[in-house]
Image (spheres, grey):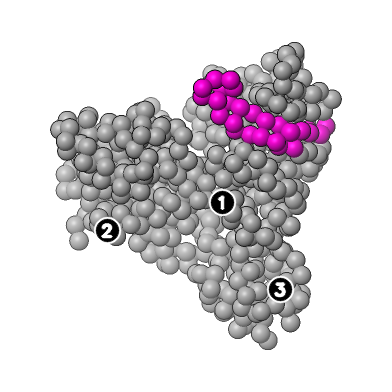
Amino acid sequence: MRNMISLQNITFKYPGTEIEVLKNVSISVKEGEWTAIVGHNGSGKSTLAKLMNGLYFPEQGYVTIADIELNKDTVWDTRRHIGMVFQNPDNQFVGTTVQDDVAFGLENHGIPQEVMVERVQTALKQVKMDDFLDQEPHHLSGGQKQRVAMASVLALRPDIIILDEATSMLDPAGRAEVIELVRELKREEDMTVLSITHDLEEAAKADRIIVMNQGEVYREGTPEEIFALGQELVALGLDLPFPLKMAHVLNEKGIPLERKPLTEEELVNELWTSFLSK
Amino acid sequence: MDILLEQVEYRYAANSPFEKKAVEEVSFKIPEGQCTAIIGHTGSGKSTLLLHLNALLKPTSGSVKIGDRTVKSGRKEKDLKPIREKVGIVFQFPEQQLFEETVMKDICYGPMNFGVSEKEAKKRAAYWLKEVGMPEDVLEKSPFDLSGGQMRRVAIAGVLAMEPEVLVLDEPTAGLDPRGRREMMEMFYRLHKERGITLVLVTHSMEDAARYADKVVVMHKGRKVHEAPPRELFSDAERLSEWGLGIPEVVKFQRMLEAKSGKTFPKVCLTMDELAEMLKQGGGLS
């Protein structure tokens, strides 16, 4: 499959600083794949996003977006392929109504009026916010705001969506809304998704997880493979899904389990057969 | 010092065409030395309520008693400084409020505003910086050269340096990584336990409410709909879901175990340790 995002041997320091926030990092994201990048604060994961849309350029290494090598001349071409949704929903609104807001990006790209109207409607329908066309964005819930932000991005028809901590300011219900939307977009539109996150529920839904630690790629694999690292992830400042955490606590209390459960159901069954029914 | 809310109502843009009632008929007590959690869906009125706790907002009707002072509608309040000195609020994303050239100056700003001498303020800055788990050598650095998590700690040190009796925390761990979240909450809880600081925790995390709170106040559509100790509150998942709220994962898991075995545990466990302990002792299941 084609690589939509490819970073090769990237080393990067922020201008005027001495610390290498990324050290020889190589990662790639395939077409139609949902990849999650997880890592502690300061692990370099957000810097990766900034390099992918050309806010910064690496000192060493290459960034390739949809087969275009990213540099100062191609930055606008590559940005056409990428839509980004950021952490704070309130910082992403310019329009006075939901539909104006979605139209803003299209206007900037010089899209003709009639096409624009159609695209705004379609995009808002995709995120199930088409009942809110004339609402003021500031009166929406956090989850609704992030869905409108996604619509603004979708209206530009990118091939790749990058979510940079896009759910971290939302309440649990808002978080679930956004994750469900990403799932649908992937399934129905075959979007390439890259989510940069602390949230395990979000990462667990991805096809592949990349773990960053202190500016380096620590491990890469399916959610099952990554979560099987267990306490190693905790040592990196990350968390584990509930069943694994619970199993660990049970072990420490002297209730040993034979297998490492990845779901609540597995853990219930395991506890039942090896302990409770005896 | 207790804080007592009585029939608090707040209307934004009162008596204008844009008037909007954010909070109504809210009464509850925040007892001294306890940890009170306030939970509720986005838009439930939590944040508006929080602004009443140190008189940043005055109720449009009803009253808020903060220690020996009463803040009431329709009355001009003079000298609110003593209230704000006693009740410190850590807002969401407090790092966005840092502004001074150095960490030292930023932490000293609050206490000096309340009349603490420069010498004393500097002493406090060094002390509280250490308490929030930061190395002393950042004191002379610009807060803007720090990482996001470190900036948050500095901002919190700035509130703590005012040495408030009541500490109000609005989603203090939002945006931090899991370790940062745990360390931050443990720090607040330690301060609460060791120094008797009264904590008010506004949170989306049912886990935190279960683990740390003595009492949980539930807000829904601008009203207080429930008030109970966490063990009681989280035993009724159905009611919580009516307010758009969930239960901690450990409680969900306990319910699954109960469904499998067809028996009920004697109590709802609020932490994984509690549940493991109960299972170990037979859990009343056999």
- A76 or B124: nearer the viewer: A76
Q: Are marks 1 and 2 in contact (CB under 8 Å)?
A: no
What's the CA distance linking mark 2 and mark 3?
A: 43 Å
Residue A72: x and y in percent read 20, 32
Q: Which amino acid does label 3 sit on?
A: Thr
Q: Name the residue under label 3.
A: B264
Element at label 3:
loop
Magenta residues, as a range? B1-27
Residue that appears at 52% across and 50% down: A172
The subunit carrying tag 3 is B
Measured from the top left, where is residue A6 in percent x and y? 25, 50
Of labels 1 and 3, earlier in sequence is: 1
- Residue shown at 53% from the left, 60% from the top: A240
Instruction: Count neighbours of disc 3 (C-alpha within 10 A) and say few if under 14, some if 14 to 19, many if 20 or more.
Output: some
Up-down relation of residue B244 to residue A86 (above or below): below
Disc assigned to residue A188: 2
Q: Indicate yes or no whether the magenta region holds residue B7.
A: yes
Chain designation of label 1 = B
Residue at the limit of the structure toward the bottom, as seen here: A278
Q: Position of residue A95 (x, y in %)?
A: 34, 29
Q: Is the magenta stretch mostly helix, strand or loop?
A: strand
Query: Nearer the observer, disc 1 or disc 2?
Result: 1
